[in-house]
Image: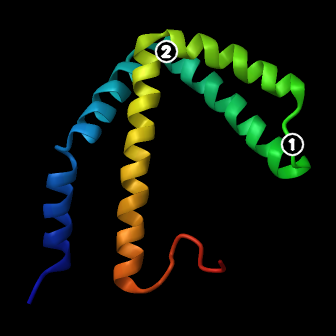
Amino acid sequence: MTNIYDKAHEFADVLKDIPEVVAYRESSKKISENPELKKMVADFRKIQIEAYNEQMQTGTISDATKEKMQKVGGVVMINPTVAAYLQSEAQFAVIWEDLLKILNEAIGVDIIAPNS
């Protein structure tokens, strides 16, 4: 009989060493060790959330928010450490989403969006 927890640990051991996860972990460490970069990412997240909330509430993003996003985004993307972090995060997010889809299909229940 297969022990599901042993398999989960095997999966975790494989996952932690794939290039996208290694890059994400390393870039995340660089951000967390530098208060200036950490604040830059936090500011970027804050404006992303603001834009998302506007989009959800009104159906559009205001020009003021778009301008803030461009300003903050421009500053963030010219910093190679922050840009690498955001890129590695996006690459990991794609993998994670794919893995969740595989797991959802395997169990036959859509645990991501049960009412969809």
Residue in the foreground of this view, choosing between 64 and 10: 64
Seen at 43% across and 47% down, the residue is: 93
Q: Give how far across and how far down residue 109 sits, in percent.
A: 47, 84
| SS under mark 2 | helix
Q: Is 19 situated left or right of 75 in this image?
A: left
Seen at 81% across and 51% down, the residue is: 56
The quadrant in which residue 50 appears is: top right
Q: For the residue carrying disc 1, how many other residues have a C-alpha within 10 Å: few (<14), some (14-19), or many (20+)?
A: few
Q: Give how far across and how far down residue 57 sits, in percent.
A: 87, 50
| Above or below 26: residue 35 | above
Q: Quadrant of the C terminus?
A: bottom right
Q: Which residue is mark 1?
A: 60
Name the mark on residue 81: none
Amino acid type of the residue that numbered disc 1 sits on in the rendered structure: Thr
| Above or below 95: residue 23 | above
Seen at 46% across and 19% down, the residue is: 82
Q: Which residue is mark 2?
A: 37
Q: Quadrant of the N terminus?
A: bottom left
